[in-house]
Amino acid sequence: MNWPGPGDDSGDDDPDLGESRRVGDLLARGGISERARLTAWVRGRVQGVGFRWWVRKNALELGLLGYAENLTDGRVKVVAEGAREGLAQLLSRLEGPGTPGQVAQVTHRWDELRGGFAGFAER
């Protein structure tokens, strides 16, 4: 996985490894902290189909804090904080089958944990 620098929203993935394996490998080597922030932008038919509710349900199951909000351009922005393993699982679910609506593309960025969330909100 490409760990983007400041301002890089590309979120390029290594096609040879699963997200949770990459995160696990980096954790084992001490290359990243155990808790972080994930920001994901989901493009497709994702508004008006229960997508934010679905994201909230999944995030809470994974013990994550944050929010999912509709953007004016039709995308949904997801900001989540918590254990990297849970964040990687949420990202995998956002990109995988079974999401409400139709996901065309997910771009994401990893950041340092900032805090300030109490629960997971739909905005």
Image (spheres, rainbow, N blue to C red):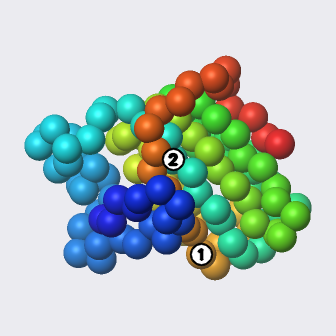
Q: Point out residue 49 in the picture as x, y percentages from the top left corner.
A: 82, 62
**Taking the image as drawn, is residue 96 in sight?**
no
Observer-nearest of 1 and 86: 1
Looking at the picture, does residue 29 appear above or below residue 33? Answer: below
Find the distance from the CA under tag 1 to the CA under tag 2: 16 Å
Q: Point out residue 119 in the picture as x, y percentages from the top left corner.
A: 66, 25
Residue drawn at 82 percent across, 69 percent down: 74
For label 2, the SS is: strand
For label 1, the SS is: strand
Q: Which mark is residue 105?
A: 1
Q: How would you rate the neighbour count of disc 2 (Cα within 10 Å): few for under 14, some for 14-19, many for 20 or more?
A: many
Looking at the picture, does residue 33 appear above or below residue 111? Answer: above
Looking at the picture, does residue 65 appear above or below residue 107? Answer: above
Report the mark closest to the observer, 1 or 2: 2
Compare marks 1 and 2 and give the one earlier in the sequence: 2
Residue drawn at 47 percent across, 32 percent down: 113
Q: What residue type is labelled 1?
A: Gln
The residue that disc 2 covers is 38
The answer to whether marks 1 and 2 mark residues whose Cβ atoms lie closer than 8 Å is: no
Residue found at the very far front of the displayed protein: 6
Looking at the picture, does residue 14 appear above or below residue 67? Answer: below
Q: Point out residue 7 in the picture as x, y percentages from the top left corner.
A: 53, 61
Q: Point out residue 71 in the picture as x, y percentages from the top left corner.
A: 82, 60
Quarter of the figure with the N terminus: bottom left
64 horizontally vs 14: left or right: right
65 horizontally vs 37: left or right: right
Residue drawn at 64 percent across, 62 percent down: 41
Observer-nearest of 24 and 73: 73
Q: What residue type is labelled 2?
A: Leu
